[in-house]
Image (tube, rainbow, N blue to C red):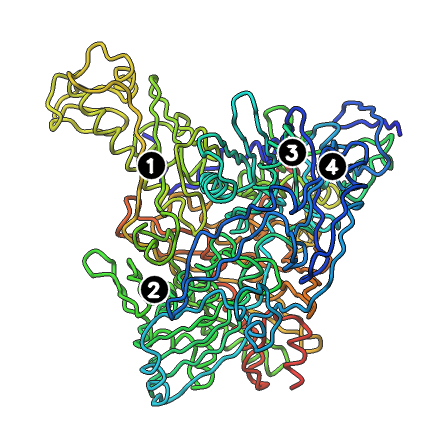
Amino acid sequence: MQITMKINGQTYSHDVEPRISLAQYLRETVDLTGTHIGCDTSGCGACTVHVDGAAVKSCTLLAVQVNGSEITTIEGMANGSELHPIQEGFKEHHGLQCGFCTPGMVMTAADILKNNPNPSEAEIREGLEGNFCRCTGYHNIVKSIQHAAEKLNA
Amino acid sequence: METFIGKSIKRREDDRFLKGAGRYTDDIKLKGMTHSAFVRSPYAHANIISIDVSEAQNMEGVVAVFTGNDACGAFGVPCGWQVDFKNGETMREPLHPLLAKDVIRHVGEAVAIVIAETQELARDAAELVKVKYKGLPAVTDPKKAMEAGAPKVHDQWPDNAAFDWCIGNDRAAVEAALANAHHVTEMEYKNHRVAPNAIEPRSYIASYDVNVDKYTLYTSTQNPHLIRLLLCAFALGIPEHKVRIVSYDVGGGFGSKIYHYTEEALLTWASKEIGRPIKWTSDRSEAFLTDAHGRDHVVHSKMGFDKEGKIVAHLTDEYCALGAYLSTFAPAVPTYLHGTLFQGVYTTPLIHLNVVAPFTHTVAVDAYRGAGRPEATYLLERMLSKAAKEMNMDPAELRFKNFIPPFDGVTQPGFQTQVALQYDSGNYEGVLKRGLEMLGYEDFRKEQAEARKNGKLLGVGISTYIEGCGIAPSAVVGALGARAGLYEVGHVRVQPTGKVSVFTGAHSHGQGHETVFAQFVADKLGIAMDDVDIVHGDTDQVAFGMGTYGSRSLSVGGSAIIKSIDKILEKGAKIAAHKLEAAEEDLVYAEGKWTVKGTDKSISFGDVSLTAYVPHDYPEGLEPGLDFSSFYDPSNFTYPFGTHIAVVEVCADTGKVTLQRFVACDDVGNVMNPMIVDGQIHGGVVQGVGQALLEEVVYDDEGQMITGSYMDYAMPRADDIPMIETDRTVTPCPHNPLGVKGAGEAGAIGSTPAVVNAVVDALAHLGVTDIQMPVTPQRVWKAMQN
């Protein structure tokens, strides 16, 4: 099935099998391997991307379902070598270790802050509820997002 | 001049991860690459009656299908540690086949591999492989596996034991001391099975290049060289110099990516058969079924005390599951990584541990973050807190009474335990004092008493742990059954321009080696961090190495690099002396240059490097170049320690436990990068909290795993956890050049008993003395009703 979508500002058009997930499409067909797959039950959140501005687990959607949508992946967050304030927060506060869950965390964090620019610690933790991190114990991820909130509100 | 040791330098690896530019194995695509899928057994124990691959083989897009009846059926992966029976009988070591041929021994065991043009086709074709099984009874619990008449995992032996083992003092002496003790505390429980769950599933790409007769295996491993050795010398019998192992970025390990897995060997073998690269990436369901698990000990323990509360004796019997086959380090975990820590931080004069380690119809158990030490710590720390309650003493007071007094290992000797080890240095009362202060312990006790009057259930739990890292020296671990040395290799190559490439056999999968190693290398050489590059994860670049596990990277791997730096500076001084026309002994090296003492005559590190590679005006008889490699074999383990304190609230209506505070005061020796050490502690603590409150791998009586997905296996999420309050004391390691001890596992070792102690403390006035982990609302609620 032929699909067309805008990913990180660039238009892509491919003939894909209807059963291919958006995560697989991004990784295998478009070669954007920053979106990771950590589970098969939508439990880990490593595959989180933005579809038309909202955070979505890309392993849960078929690529054909988002035909015509605008997608942002982790590769679309930085401005060249300049990190997005959320990425900068993660670096500043050691919000990542192995880096595997990080793309999903950053995309989820962007969604949290978009909907609530001044979240409390509890609201950040609740917002991260769909994303596993096995390395950081979440402590520094929370601080990273608090840092980003301050920066974005400044 | 800017120095870097001890500073929270931001990580240089972060930018690539933050931009989605990591180089994980599944991100790699090779020309002509095929994909694979496994046919796995739905039975825990069965005979294979027949396998029909014809339909799969004939499907369009399928490249090959292999089963145990092909040549690969003769190969198996080896075990790297041998623990023999107490009576001298050799450890029972079954073939761990790459593909099961006749008998299935755990759910998820691979029966066939299907290789196809795409991942989807491989999976479609795998569904067309028809396997007929005859199901057989299974046993998954280690104690039940040793009962008379239990289903046997391997028919060739009379029972399921792989070995038994004991450590410590004479059992009769320990039993006699217990019989005469003023008070004996007893515990029976299961330190249950958990799954490591690195978020990156295991992933491999094997490729064979016929033109240069060379294999390349891209693998998500914690120890590339060890995998190469096991793969070549033991699994497949292929020449080691014809194999390159690459593991660039690895998405977490926690032990589960130490081991040489069957899929690695099978893909490597098959890549030559089909003449094309093959990729396999585990999905999460396969990860639950096939990644090595942790813990799974059934424990019965007694500890005796005198009138004052001093421990007089400790006797424990354990059944420790190994799974269906012996994973790489499995025999070491419930023995030398476990029983050797039974001294804990206490002066206990008599200790005896007896271990029976059976095969079970489950996936293997091997080292998971802490590996044997969390199990030892859980036992000791629950025991101390339970005993304190029974003797009507404060749990902190009982610990203070029993601590080994402080010793620095330099002016005072190390502490010889009753269980083989000699601790390097420690100040155990120091971390408990600081931990109690951080918490505000006395105030908390008042708050708790007040809360109880209002029906609110608050509890505090203390844990004072010690652990052993960087296990060594090689001769000692060899005598204990290790089939490998446990040294590390550090290669420092100074380039002609004075830039430095460091090749380490340690492997970073989240620990930040690229930053931390550059910090101390830059300081020792007096150069900028930007002038130092850290290379790891490629056997064609790094000479050799033993990898990263057991919190060994800095204490062992870092020390190997320091050895090479010493050699560089020694040779550099000869070149400098020649150029400065001075005697070597008149030179001092500081801030990146050699200076003639008492003068302003000096030569920079860069100029000496250039001279070494352009040796026109050069010391006679000295070899050109500035490039040294060293092996460092430590003289002892290192022994980090600490105090962890948890505060919980238990909901009186539902039994739900909320972790309100977590205080950790750890002593990991000298600290290179406080930010990274704190991060390691946070992550370890939360894994330990996960075991205490949420996580459990459950097999049913037929050997089916009923917690095989993230819908069923509860790992901590962000809203289960509070901020972790950390501090540290610093007691340097006296026997390695950086004075470091290791921080990777400490969090997971100290935290679990602190949480369970807190839950029991919250319910103590209701008569609750113990609760089986994980402390789920159901278990707590039931305990409250009884």
Establish if B129 lies above or below B605. below
The residue type indicated by label 3 comes to Ile
Mark 4–mark 2 CB contact (< 8 Å): no
Cα separation between marks 4 and 2: 56 Å
Residue B269 location (% of width, % of height): 58, 37
Under tag 2, what secondary structure?
helix
- Mark 1 — residue? B561
- Res. B660 visible in picture: no
Cα separation between marks 3 and 1: 36 Å
Q: Chain of mark 1?
A: B
Cα separation between marks 2 and 1: 32 Å
Report whether B650 appears left or right of B642.
Answer: right
- Mark 4 — residue? B119
Report whether B78 appears left or right of B411.
Answer: right
Q: Chain of mark 3?
A: B
Q: Chain of mark 2?
A: B
Residue B640 location (% of width, % of height): 37, 57
